[in-house]
Image (tube, rainbow, N blue to C red):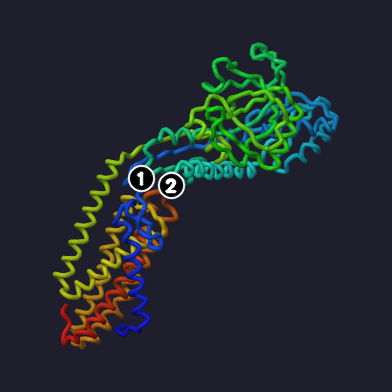
Amino acid sequence: MLYFANWKIALICAICALGVLLSLPNLFSQSLLAQVPRLLPHKQVALGLDLRGGSYLLLQVDVAAAQREHLNSLIDNVRNVLRDANIGYTGLDVEGDAIAFTIREPDRIDDARQALRKIDPDLTVDIAADGSGTMRFSTVATDARRRQAVDQSIEIIRRRIDETGTKEPTIQREGSDRILVQLPGVDNPEHVKALLGRTAKLTFQLVDTGVSVEDARRGRLPAFDEVLPAEEGRAGHAGPPAYVVRKRVMVGGDTLVDAQPTFQNNEPVVSFRFDAAGAKRFGDATRENVGKPFAIVLDNKVISAPVIREPILGGSGIISGSFTVQSASDLALLLRAGALPAPITILEERTVGPDLGADSIHAGAIASIVGVVLVVVFMILFYGLFGVFADIALFFNLCLMLGSLSLLGATLTLPGIAGIALTMGMAVDANVLIYERIREEVRSGRSMLSSLDAGFKRAFGTILDSHVTTLVAGFLMFWLGSGPVKGFAVTLSIGVLTSLFSAILVTRLLIVTWLRQWKPKAIPI
């Protein structure tokens, strides 16, 4: 236990030096780090919401709306299948979580059932003897689509937040249909809320010029039409407050590959570009409807309704409509990130001010410094020179912990600071076990070298057991916990590993080096 090969000494020294190097960026500001050569480490430990300030949002995904929308998208398929099979029907519509319809000819019920089952294997088709029928997804398919809607919402929310430049956001699932969003350092939470709350579903639909809005509101609305309001502030004062548009979508926003804010005639607009399939559909639709107006619809509101002057074959276009620079940038961001699969509701919102975060940092720093000072003084008073060795190992332990957190890009929270303070105590606790064991061996009459060797060997099992049990607890907290609990588990687990390294290897190397250099006659402990 007291012999170190040269390669082991070099490896321990290299690890300690690397820990110091990786932890150094945390002592400097971002402006100073920007002047440091890129070859040197630049990563810092990110501060969590409770330290840096920012916004906390709890969102709920309306998974039922996503299910209804998917059923609505299948209605055209049902209509086409029944028409191709020459089966008469009536009352085709979405009711609750099912597509409802009635087959006019009872003798064609079996034919209708066989044809409709081919639309989607996940759909269950039930048709009664009187011809009334429903189509709904199975329980397994419904649960899978709900999970998919939440997962897709998380990914799109992440894209939108990343586009705003927010650093170190926390976005995770809470329960079956909720999403937790933490945004450290956000100074304009209302803007972020506005971006997250919009579904951003973009569609291009033809305007039905043969039916006026007044006629539609009097009940004379064709089954294939719908009335959509104009978005406030976008249609202009001369434009109508609402439009009658065809329900059939010419092109959907899911085929967009890019959207950017730009200027046209000194006014902010949004340019967009389709993929190959979208460009073909858009080109075909504009070629077949030259001279007719088409509506650009965002979240069931008409942004603008320009007239198709000529076929648009390039797969790109411009969205105009009295935008401001900010609104054009926001719309481009939303279109780039993609549409949410379902509406989102903000259930809970909390804002932590930067002053409160600064107070937390100050209080945590004071507590950590006081704790470290007390530990250092205690070790020196009780163990003398060996206490100094333990304190040196404690310094490298702290550097290795901060360096690891920086390298991993971990986010430090108040519970994380508590985890660091706890591991500082655990680090010297291992040294206490070793030193007390050495004292017992000396009292039993062993020689100096034999006492040192026995102290490290016999205390190692106890130290390893205590650290492994703590690691198990940290793993369980990380696996089962969330938010601050995970932060505490990460710092605790990293601290346990680094304290094991510092107490067993660094302290032992210092003692061995002292023995070789000074060749003492007795152990000063």
The count of marks equals 2
Residue at x 44%, y 53% (from the top left corner): 480
99 left or right, relative to 163: right
Q: Amino acid at mark 2?
A: Thr
Give the Cα distance between marks 2 and 1: 9 Å
Q: Is residue 214 above or below residue 269?
A: above
Q: Amino acid at mark 1?
A: Leu
Choose top left, top right, bottom left or bottom right for residue 225.
top right
Picture coordinates of residue 513, whole percent (x, y)? 25, 81
419 left or right, relative to 336: left
428 left or right, relative to 254: left
Reading the image, the residue beneath label 1 is 49
Residue at x 16%, y 66% (from the top left corner): 378
Q: In what quadrant of the picture does the N terminus appear? A: bottom left
SS at mark 2 in the image: strand
Q: In what quadrant of the picture does the C terminus appear? A: bottom left
SS at mark 1 in the image: helix
- Which mark is first along the chain, 1 or 2? 1
Number of other residues with Cα within 10 Å of mark 2, as a class: few under 14, some 14 to 19, many 20 or more: some
Picture coordinates of residue 184, whole percent (x, y)? 38, 44
Residue 418 visible to the viewer:
yes
The furthest residue to the left: 381
Number of other residues with Cα within 10 Å of mark 1, as a class: few under 14, some 14 to 19, many 20 or more: many
Residue at x 37%, y 65% (from the top left corner): 469
Reading the image, the residue beneath label 2 is 170
The furthest residue to the front: 265
Q: Are marks 2 and 1 in contact (CB under 8 Å)?
A: yes
Choose top left, top right, bottom left or bottom right for residue 489.
bottom left
Q: Is residue 463 above or below residue 218?
A: below
Residue at x 65%, y 39% (from the top left corner): 274
In-front residue for pair 373/426: 373
